[in-house]
Amino acid sequence: MNRRDFMKTASGVSAAAAAAGAAGSSAAAQDAPALQEGGNESGGNQSGGGNESGAGNESGAGNQSGGGGGTTHEVVVGPGGDLVFDPAEVTIAPGDTVRWVWDSDNHNIAPGSTPDGAEWEGHPEIANSGTEYTHTFETTGTFEYVCEPHVASGMEGSVVVQEGGGGGGGGGAAAEFDPHNIGVPMQKHYIGAATFLAIFATIGFTFYLLKYGESANTSYPNKKD
């Protein structure tokens, strides 16, 4: 095969690869609306597990306060003996509940500053590992609190109550990411990648052949021995 014939063949391969890539992109564009519509109908909008939670409010291990039907967020008191609340800040929505669980001894929850009109007594009694205390927050604003025996060590926390809530931790596992809901099926990506790889391979081989010459076995008219 001489260079002219090879160039014709390489051009044909590149054109075919480009056509395959265009077909894959077109199919992906047609599938995207259907996938997005399916994503909007997914069970995430129908979930109600958070509203059904109430295990913390039913606990009898410690004092209880409130009994709202919102999501329950958990805060560990003195995890592993460390003088901290984990997490130190929780952002929730009005009507959500916070459950404090003691993981070590000699801690309490003493409220500091609270929003105007809010009533919250905390858990002033010093308690030990295994104690649980819950409270449902209805008033928006920031509720700050400390552990009085360890306030000098910086053991303090806060609950931020705002419309829409937030990701302050303790409210349940994050939704599992589904790659099929990103708008384009995964197999279309593979087709596109394979198409571009074929194009680049063809161009690279053509460049190599043009740069370093034809094969020693290639014959052409007027070739000198």
Image (spheres, rainbow, N blue to C red):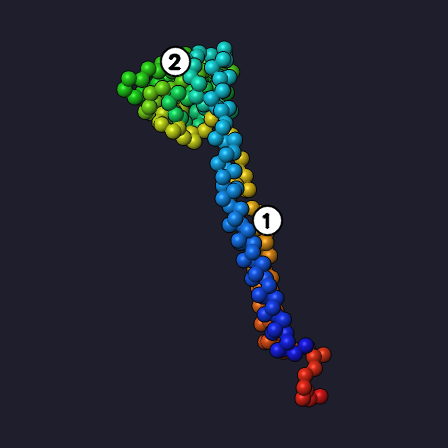
Q: Quadrant of residue 133?
A: top left
What is the crowding at mark 1: few (fewer than 14 residues within 10 Å), some, or many (at least 20)? few
Q: Secondary structure at mark 1?
A: helix
Tell me, yes or no, if residue 124 can be seen here: yes
Residue at which label 2 appears: 124
What is the crowding at mark 2: few (fewer than 14 residues within 10 Å), some, or many (at least 20)? some
Query: What distance separates the C-alpha of mark 2 from that of mark 1?
Result: 59 Å
Labels 2 and 1: the sequence-earlier one: 2
Q: Is residue 1 left or right of residue 78?
A: right
Q: Residue at x 65, y 78 (%)?
A: 2
Nearest-to-viewer mark from 2 and 1: 1
Q: Amino acid at mark 2?
A: Pro
Q: Is residue 134 left or right of residue 188?
A: left
Residue 158, horizontal then vertical, whole percent? 37, 25
Residue at which label 1 appears: 187
Q: Secondary structure at mark 2?
A: strand
In the depicted view, which residue is nearer to us: 162 or 183?
183
Q: Amino acid at mark 1?
A: Gln
